[in-house]
Image: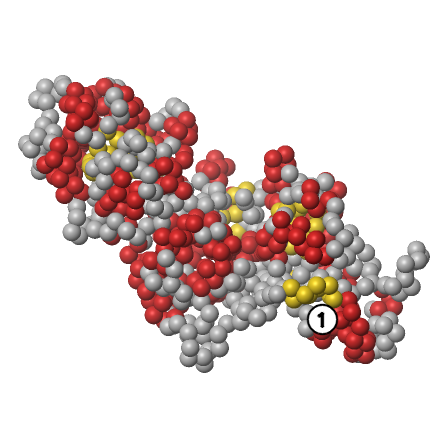
Amino acid sequence: MLHGIEGSDYSSAVDIAAAYLPNQQVGQYPGAGSLTLLPVTRRVALKPPSIEPADLLTPGRDPYFLTEALAALAARIGASTVVIDLRAGATELSAPVLLDPRVQRVFVTTLSHQSLVGTEHLVKQLGQRAPALQGQDPASSVVITQFRNDVHREQAERAVQQLSDALSSSLRLPDQNTGQDGATGSIDTQVLSDPVRSPFREELLALPSSWDAVLGVLRNCQIAQALEPLLPAPADTQPRAEGDAEGPDYVELRRRLAETTRRFIYAEKEGLSSASGFLVTDPLRRLLGSHRTEPPIALVVGAKGAGKTFMYAKMCAARTWDRFAQRSGMEDVRISAPIVPVLESTHLEYRDLTPQDLREAFAASHGEGQAMGTGAQAIRDHLTNGLLALDPRDDTAWRRLWLECLMMAAGLSLPEDGSGVEAALAELGRRTKAVFVIDGLEDLMQSLDSEAKRTALRVLLVDVLTWLRSLRGRPLGLVVFVRQDLVRWAVRQNSGQLLARYESFALRWNKEEALRLALWAAAHADALPEPLDESQITEIPYDDLVKKLMQVWGRKMGTEKSKEARSHLWVPAALGDFNDQVQARDVIVFLSEAAQKSIGQASWKDRVLAPSAMRNALLRCSEIKIEAIQSENQEVGDLLKALQQVRQQVTVPFELDEVGLSVSEADSLVDSGVFARGKDGRYFVAEIYRHGLGFGTERRAKVLWHR
């Protein structure tokens, strides 16, 4: 019918087709509507098509004549989405659709070499001829299918990287380098260029004949969940009108979120007074679950800002191990062992409860009374004296010194001649149980400049824990909160083996846990339009988690009808490094900054955080991140400081000679997740670092999305 039209007015063809299409409906499902099938032809004879592309794209017609006619037909019958199933590859018949940048182009490929190369080539060609304008046109997508996770994991990872690079090249940033696109456009490109993986399912090899049965198979295979990143926003979900007086007071919600998260940025400022109010993560669950009937003897490793001091404070606030477990949602931990702090961060602030209160309470019940006044400073002085006096090669002397620190915290008198320490602690274990906790080791080891410090830390992390395990019945526990870089520095040999032993307790935040932390912080601050019990957040399925977070930052980084990236994908991409890690402090800083900047954004009535505020919050997040790295890892911190002092403007990706780094120095930054090396040898910088370094991005961003 379009072929028979004179000129570009396709309204008559749309009128005729719209009259017949109701007969082509399949099913009617509550909340999902129906599917309408538009046949390509009614002729079943095998012969060449009677209509060629030249018959449609005649001179004088818009080059997008076909897609606009299909859109007009869909609008006439009330359809929300048009899905066109094209033949594989680029053909003359498919070109009018593929070359329209307003069409969301979805390519399906297997891991076969020919299929991958062909898809990559086609995506890049379209990027050159019909690139999608980021934020206005829908981004192209790739679905990788017909593979098994247990067999093809490495091939799938390589395919994701290969196709992600091609997809990013098909996006074009707006011509005007605005604050929004210029500062954070590469994050959007990174999110929008992430291929979708749909592993092999046998059920899809033989689909049944009825549409209802097909839907049942698709539900069982969770196809909708796999393809969720490709789905358009629901047509009935629109932001609240600006003049609508109903609804929550978003200014007040933003103020609450900003104030609460500002206090959480530095957990040591919260003190020990409150035992409630923390997110129960998988590492904490495993730590508690592995020590239901005996005190824990473990290292809790985490980077600066991962939440070590926060967990230490909450553990002390609970006073006993079983009470800490109860407040973490675990009711079957049966050890009523007191928490006894040995060392704490020098920056920890106190209110109505201090670590010294816990030490004195334990000493009053189980100590000898003579040392009830022993405080953290006395213990710290005892260790400092040991650093000056003890032979770095004498591991036995250092183990005795650490055990003396445990005795001092427990209120036990130290033997005058230094002997009998082990016997005294063993006797304490026969009388009672206790869980000693140590934090703030970085304060004691401010400069890693001596063999004595290395020996002291190694003996604590290895020998002291081994000795405690040797006690009959293991009555005394010890939890040491320590940075990973300190572990590697102190334990020269087999540090990997030591870290692997305690890997399940390590404070590492992946993207899903970061999202849960964001929802927990908003719920804890009472900053959600629909209040939520924060204790239930750890049990919320991922899909429901994403839906509840829409109250915080909407579905997209823009309006529902925009072509922006989905918010729940954008945030972890903006805050994570190339090792796929997101630090808890970075999430809290982001929420605090974004909430504060959103207070004046009165036009956004469907979310707490405004998109522009979220984008602008990244600079401060990046600055704090670099400051933390400089105090945590001197080698990486010095390299970041040198990068900040580069005089010329650096655009990502870049060559090493542009920033004055050697290959070995770049490798160190790659291992730390700061850098990623592209296929062409140039380097990318994770967004959480790029802003603080002052680096720019290419106009047509090509971002390596590392998984």
**The N terminus lies in quadrant:** bottom right
Residue reaching furthest to the left: 370
Disc 1 marks which amino acid? Ala
Relative horizontal placement of residue 108, taking residue 681 as reference (left or right): right
| 67 up-or-down from 548: above or below | below
**Residue 357 location (% of width, % of height):** 14, 43
Name the residue located 66 percent from the left edge and 52 percent from the top edge: 216
Residue 697 visible in the picture? no
Name the residue located 76 percent from the left edge and 53 percent from the top edge: 209
Coloration mode: secondary structure
**Residue 651 location (% of width, % of height):** 52, 53
Report the front residue among 665 and 244. 244
**The C terminus lies in quadrant:** top right
- Residue behind mark 1: 74
**Residue 504 location (% of width, % of height):** 41, 35
Name the residue located 64 percent from the left edge and 38 percent from the top edge: 148
Relative horizontal placement of residue 554, taking residue 216 as reference (left or right): left
Q: How many marks?
A: 1
Mark 1 residue element:
helix
| 483 up-or-down from 459: above or below | below
- Dividing the picture into quadrants, the one containing residue 113 is top right
Neighbourhood count class around disc 1 (C-alpha, 10 Å): few under 14, some 14–19, many 20 upward = some
Residue 143 visible in the picture? yes
Report the front residue among 407 and 114. 407
Report the front residue among 519 and 595. 519
Name the residue located 23 percent from the left edge and 23 percent from the top edge: 399
**Residue 494 location (% of width, % of height):** 40, 24
| 298 up-or-down from 267: above or below | above
